[in-house]
Image (cartoon, rainbow, N blue to C red):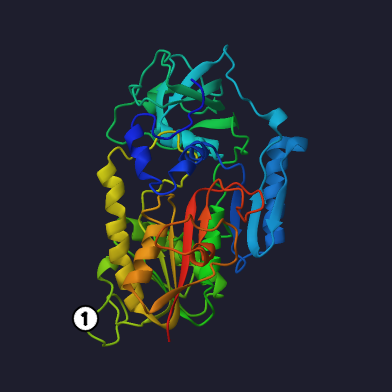
Amino acid sequence: MLYPKTPFLSNPLLEAEILKVNSAALAQLLEWLCLTPCITTYRVNRLRTTVAEYREKLVDKLTARYGQRAPKVYGLDSLPEVLCIAALDPQFVESSPDLTLKEVIVDTVCGAALLRGAHIYAPGVLAMESSTQPQELVNVFSDLAGKCKRGMASRYECSDKVFLGQGRVLMQRYQLFNNNEEPASGVAVEMQSNISGVPALGDLSSADALLQNLPSIVCVRVLDPQPGERVLDMCAAPGNKTTHIAELMGDRGCVVALDSSKSRVLGMRSRLGNYKSIQAHVFDSTKAVCPTDSPSAGPPFPCASFDRVLLDAPCSGLGNRPQLCCTIKQAKVLQSYPNVQRRLFVQAVQLLRPGGILVYSTCTVTEAECESIVAWALKKFPEIHLVEASPRWGSPGLPMPQLDVSQTQMLQRFGPSEDNGSKGLDTVGFFIAKFQKDL
């Protein structure tokens, strides 16, 4: 089939929930969400290495893989910790399948990841044709319809499968579909090329640098944490923004990281252990305010305990790109997120000291979770006001009846807008608002 132009092929009624006020911009937004950001970004930990040293490592990796075809690696003004990897030249991008090759079918989550440069891990493989051999080159398709049966051995004939690229097989059928209690793990297919042109390097994250979306990096720069401050990351897992906060503070001060999931906190603790300033707790941030003013080493905390608060709120995640098929199927699921976001915001304002900074962010594009939350917050909390969310790499917020032009100009929305401040850098969808509490 042709590449999708909406993530809601199976549920078009959900489209109406995304932009209720700015509905004229919806078609462009939906098509943009299906496309792959062409730039790959790494955030370098400058407490451990230099940007120049890590750039050399990336260049060596790319040269070893692509030779003279290797894409450019470059930095960004006002974001000195960032390195970007450009897309491959279009003439070297495989855009159609080789009809002589066998096929591998992956789910849409795996398909989206491989378009961002990942390899195919075993859990993402739905089907592999029988007699496929190790090191054999195969066409890779994604099943948009969700009808492919796991373990299928014949060719999956379906009009709703889309070609994504070609890869080399590392695991055979008996390893992938063994029916054991322990599911298969590891790289099943090493991608050689994809239709997006993003270099197929996998994830090169280490203690020295982290593969991270550009708006997430901008978000912490907007927070602007300073050495010696006390900072709260309310919804911290997987800890990427938490470590960035600590790095910008020179690992001096206190960064409190909360998350309600025990497994996610345990998963990030090994990485957070490299920073002496970070304290991680399993705790529900909707209950983060202590009913008394007595000092507390751990949550809950008294009011006005923090100089800066990052509320990177749980959200619908509709800004993640590419989206081949949205996993949210019901409008009531989309409508549930603003309720949680407002409950968290109530706690955040109380925990912020007078004069302190609160940054609210989401990795989604719905008005209800972005601009509408800002309008609600300004009405409910007269003690806070918007300030410029700089450095500016996104566009202003969308126009809303409850916000004046000067207020939307202070917001950052990452989307398909032509006045995106990222100067041609293609990113995921994201939203950032910065507030200050009155003295």
**Above or below 251: residue 37:** above
Query: Which percent across, then down, holds residue 256?
Result: 39, 73
Residue count near mark 1 (Cα–Cα under 10 Å), binned few <14, some 14–19, many ≥20: few
Q: Is residue 135 left or right of residue 317?
A: right
In percent of the image, x 53 and y 67: which residue is there? 389
**Above or below 11: residue 103:** above
In percent of the image, x 63 and y 35: which residue is there? 197
In percent of the image, x 50 and y 70: which residue is there? 223
Q: Is residue 350 left or right of residue 186?
A: left
Q: Which residue is mark 1?
A: 291
From this viewpoint, is residue 291 visible? yes
Quadrant holding the C terminus: bottom left
Q: Is residue 119 left or right of residue 350?
A: right
Residue 97, by quadrant, is top right
Query: Which percent across, then down, holds residue 420?
Result: 60, 53
User: For this rendering, which residue is in front, 174 or 105?
Assistant: 105
Amino acid type at image mark 1:
Pro
User: For this rendering, which residue is in front, 38 or 256?
Assistant: 38
**Above or below 49: residue 1:** above
